[in-house]
Amino acid sequence: MLKNEEVIDASTPLLEVAQIKESIPESSLYSNAALSGIVVVSIGVLLFWVITLATSRKKLRKANQQLAASNKEICRQNEVLLKQNQEVNAQREDSDKKRKTLEETNQVKDKIFSIISHDFRSPLNTIQGVLNLLHMDVLSPEELKSMLPHLTRKVDYSINLLDNLLNWSRTQMNGLKVNTITFTLEPEIEETVSMMSQLARQKSIRIEKNILKNCLVLADPDMIQLVVRNLLSNAIKFTNPGGLIRISTEVKGTNVVISISDTGIGMDEASIQKLFKQTGYTTKGTAEEKGTGLGLRLCSEFVHRNGGKISVESKLDEGTSFYFTLPLSEVLEEVPYEKTVLRS
């Protein structure tokens, strides 16, 4: 009996489940099934969207990488083009510079030919004419004596011109070497002044010298003589009769400064800017003296080749001062300036 009761009790939950199932409406079961379907579909759509998004991001990343590589290549090509443009511009600038140098050289060459054909021949023709007169014995001693100053000027001019032409041609062919030695500056200046003093006397120009004794410099003495000679010749050329030229030296630091000043006609700023031009710049002197325009160019080049600098100061109708420096070797002793005046 008890066993039957136990069986009944065990089957009771199943009966209850069946009863509950029967009690649930059939529409609810359909709703649940539909909801489950929607959930499944949504999950599927979501998975599809996630997969699609992942694929798109992968494609986008690959496209970005390709774009970055393309940009990098474009940048590289731009750098190559920029470098090529810079090289082309540099070549163009170099060509322009060479063309300008060639034009300037041609201008100077033309000027040199003009100098040789006219300025150099003119004094020689004068000397030849006087020699012919002497040969014909038609000149009295007094007439010959009166011609000597004029002949002296012609000879000095020709020598200076020839020196400048030869030195200029050597600088153009890079055949001019600087023979640097240690030498005393004063004797070189004195020798040059002595050579030029006759020209100064012919115009009644006084030369005042304040030159430091025993001043040793490191330079090429021949070049320095040419510089002093050209600057002194310029001073004589542009100083009126009865004027004054001062030559002085002064030690400043490791250099000695040589100055050549005159009380001549002076220059304006525009004229100063033309002085050291390659093409040459020249005007007639106070006694109609001629120049080649090469002297100051050579002065500038020679001073720089000897480790110095050259400059000029001038005031119109007051005078001009040229300054150039040379490396100082040593000053043997402190000796005061010796003032010397060469009178006409």
Image: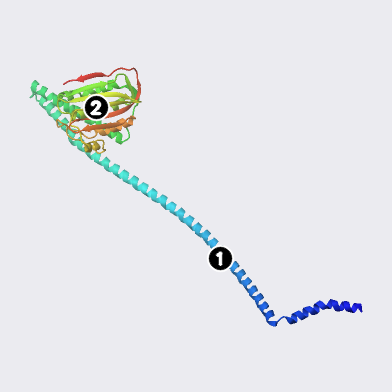
Q: Is residue 190 visible?
A: no
SS type, badge 2: strand
**What residue is shown at x 30% (from left), y 24% (from top)?**
250
Estimate the x, y position of residue 23 in percent, counting from the top left.
74, 81
Between 111 and 23, the residue placed more toward the observer is 23
Compared to 161, does 64 lie above or below?
Answer: below
Residue type at mark 1 is Ser
Between 85 and 61, the residue placed more toward the observer is 61
**What residue is shown at x 24% (from left), y 27% (from top)?**
260
Compared to 251, does 269 lie above or below?
Answer: below
244 sits left or right of 8 in the view: left
**Location of mark 1 (residue):** 56
Estimate the x, y position of residue 267 in percent, counting from the top left.
20, 34
Q: Earlier in the sequence, mark 2 or mark 1?
A: 1
Residue type at mark 2 is Ile
171 sits left or right of 28 in the view: left
**Location of mark 2 (residue):** 260
Compared to 146, does 69 lie above or below?
Answer: below
